[in-house]
């Protein structure tokens, strides 16, 4: 779907530190996201996972270190500009537009793909109208894909939590991102919903070739779907590798079993 | 006791039935006034929807727009050119407000943005008077303030023009913000700044558009009210009249602002004419606020506002 520079990693995080006052949330974290992979970022509570995601999506800016996307430096871009580069995200606590229908929510994901002038759009004629219809067709495909046809016209705020998460994924997909960031896509879901979400994530990765970086707590899920796992603990990266290797890593086991930090 | 009940409940209705043409005139007068309230209320709703900010400066924007227009005309600028220049000034003002007031305050509490708009009120008031002076000015838009009769009902030309203009503007804006992409982006921004940003919706552009449109609405409101009662400081006080309209209609609803304006406009005229004599008149001055108070007690989100759901 998106032409990727085959030569290097899609995203490079290079020695990034983030501070909130005296609290160091991230300390010289470096990692790479390779095109086409599913990368899982795991770690105990407060390890800095969401902070890292917020840095990548431009909501936080690192106090030191650099970010490169497709080889270009973009350390200082804000969230709207990051989105324009082709990075979409979901939020830990679901940030849907609650008063809008599911369809409208996913349509907002198309904003960056809309080209016609808004004044034309205002009078709903010619190219603006054709464009709106084309976007509508694309959004209907996403709705089919996520199996949420039945709730298209329901205001997002009225949906159960599991479905809200699914709609939020749909909104992120509507932007046709090169890199999709998912912040705990399975939090608060039951087993069945988790299985559905796993299937969607794998399908997105395979069918559209979308690169995915996700934060997840459920270890069995991570081991099942991730190509590579990065482990954070107290703002530092303590492991990086295939799931099987990371699972046997002593530092990771210590972090999860709560070995006292000297 | 019975006498009092009769005076309150029966006599006014009998009056209405007794003189239908006069009742028509009262109702039409109410609709006209109501549309003008809607127009001012709409300015508030647009900005509130897009940023969650209650724009205290909306009333002063009406005054400022009218002052600019009259000031230019007094200096010999032809009406059409003066109008275009005023539009340019209000759009420039929108850019200025975004750059100087809103941008440094992104992600701050709503109350802080609200305070900032109070500051803006004082600035615009002083700036307007510095530029154009503080004397009362007459605004002549070339429509005679005279009446004609339709089927025995007196209709004022100026009020009719104002009402039609307001109705058209309100309809256009309602369609623009409910049916278009900009409208969708606007609702998205109002719902969740972070999520909107993560989709690449440019907050700055949206804010400039909304404040510019609120500025245009202020121009129209300024011309209409200015032509009726002269351009003077008290023009900014019509914002106070828009407040109960907003509470009644719901702060987040464009149709609500229209319905609220009409209900208040018609309600206060009818109450004044038919029930006014019972309490010695002046119902028009407090009717809107009593209605607003009653609505707040029963339905705090207003007639058409989005229901306030909060997790505790």
Image: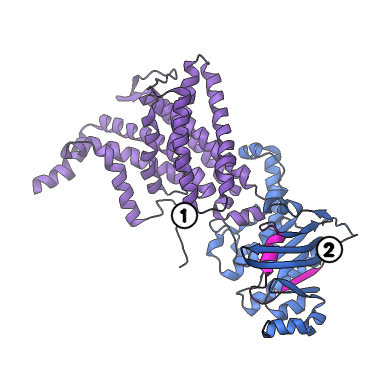
- Count of marks overlaid on the render: 2
Disc number placed over residue A191 in the picture, else none:
none
Tell me where residue B208 appears, x and y as whole percent.
59, 40
Mark 1 chain = B
Tell me the shade of chain B. purple
> Which residue, given by chain and number where applicable, does mark 2 sit on?
A35
Is disc 1 surrounded by few (<14), some (14 to 19) or many (20+) residues within 10 Å?
few
Q: SS at mark 2?
A: loop
Colour scheme of the picture: by chain
Q: CA distance from mark 2 to mark 1?
A: 43 Å
Instruction: Note whether residue B197 is visible.
Output: yes
Residue B290 or residue B96, whichever sits in front = B96
Q: Which residues are magenta?
A: A34-63
Residue appearing at x 45%, y 38% in the figure: B121
- Residue contact between numbered discs 2 and 1, judged by CB atoms under 8 Å: no
Tell me where residue B150 appears, x and y as whole percent.
34, 24
Query: Residue A35 magenta-drawn?
Result: yes
Is disc 2 surrounded by few (<14), some (14 to 19) or many (20+) residues within 10 Å?
many
Horizontally, is A150 left or right of B78 in the view?
Answer: right
Instruction: Note whether residue A173 is visible.
Output: no
Disc number placed over residue B306 in the picture, else none:
1
Q: SS at mark 1?
A: loop
Q: Quadrant of the N terminus of chain A?
A: bottom right
Tell me where residue B205 appears, x and y as whole percent.
63, 42
Horizontally, is B208 left or right of B166 in the view?
Answer: right
Residue appearing at x 76%, y 79% in the figure: A223
In the image, the chain rendered in blue is: A
């Amino acid at each position: 779907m998106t032409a990727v520079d085959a030569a290097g990693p899609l995203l490079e995080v290079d020695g990034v530190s983030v501070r909130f006052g005296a609290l160091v949330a991230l300390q010289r974290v470096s990692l790479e996201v390779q095109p086409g992979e599913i990368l899982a970022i795991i770690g105990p509570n407060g390890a800095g996972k969401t902070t890292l995601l917020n840095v990548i999506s431009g909501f936080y800016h690192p106090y030191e270190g650099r970010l490169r996307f497709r080889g270009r430096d973009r350390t200082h871009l804000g969230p709207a500009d990051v989105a324009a580069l082709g990075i979409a995200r979901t939020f830990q606590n679901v940030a849907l537009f609650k008063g809008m229908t599911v369809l409208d929510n996913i349509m907002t994901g198309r904003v960056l793909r809309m080209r016609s002038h808004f004044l034309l759009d205002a009078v709903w004629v010619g190219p603006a109208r054709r464009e709106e219809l084309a976007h509508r067709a694309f959004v209907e495909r996403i709705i089919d894909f996520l199996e949420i046809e039945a709730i298209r016209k329901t205001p997002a705020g009225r949906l159960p939590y599991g479905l809200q998460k699914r709609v939020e994924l749909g909104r992120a997909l509507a932007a046709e991102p090169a890199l999709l960031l998912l912040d705990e896509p399975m939090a608060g879901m039951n087993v069945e919903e988790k299985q559905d979400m796993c299937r969607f994530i794998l399908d997105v990765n395979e069918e559209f070739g979308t690169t995915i970086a996700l934060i997840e707590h459920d270890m069995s899920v991570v081991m099942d779907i991730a190509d590579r796992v990065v482990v954070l603990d107290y703002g530092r990266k303590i492991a990086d590798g295939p799931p099987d290797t990371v699972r046997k890593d002593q530092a990771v086991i210590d972090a999860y079993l709560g070995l006292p930090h000297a | 006791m019975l006498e009092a009940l009769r005076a309150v409940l029966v006599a006014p209705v009998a009056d209405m039935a007794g003189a239908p043409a006069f009742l028509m005139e009262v109702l039409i007068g109410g609709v006209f006034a109501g549309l003008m309230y809607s127009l001012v209320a709409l300015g508030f709703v647009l900005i509130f929807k897009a940023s969650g900010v209650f724009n205290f400066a909306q009333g002063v924007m009406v005054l400022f727009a009218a002052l600019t227009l009259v000031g230019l005309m007094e200096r010999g600028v032809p009406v059409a050119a003066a109008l275009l220049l005023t539009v340019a000034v209000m759009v420039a003002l929108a850019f200025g407000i975004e750059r100087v007031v809103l941008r440094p305050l992104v992600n701050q509490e709503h109350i802080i943005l609200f305070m900032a708009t109070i500051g803006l009120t004082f600035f615009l008031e002083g700036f307007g008077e510095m530029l154009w002076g503080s004397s009362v000015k007459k605004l002549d838009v070339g429509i005679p303030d005279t009446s004609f009769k339709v089927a025995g009902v007196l209709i004022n030309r100026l009020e009719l023009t104002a009402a039609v203009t307001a109705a058209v503007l309100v309809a256009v804006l309602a369609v623009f913000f409910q049916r278009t992409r900009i409208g969708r982006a606007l609702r998205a921004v109002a719902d969740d700044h972070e999520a909107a940003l993560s989709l690449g919706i440019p907050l700055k552009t949206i804010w400039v558009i909304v404040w510019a449109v609120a500025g245009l609405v202020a121009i129209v409101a300024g011309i209409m009210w200015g032509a009726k009662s002269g351009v003077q400081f008290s023009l900014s006080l019509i914002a106070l009249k828009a407040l109960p309209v907003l509470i009644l209609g719901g702060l987040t609803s464009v149709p609500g602002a229209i319905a609220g304006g009409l209900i208040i406009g018609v309600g206060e005229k009818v109450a004044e004419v038919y029930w006014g004599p019972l309490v010695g008149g002046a119902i028009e001055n407090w009717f809107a606020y009593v209605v607003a108070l009653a609505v707040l007690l029963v339905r705090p989100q207003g007639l058409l506002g989005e229901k306030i759901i909060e997790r505790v």
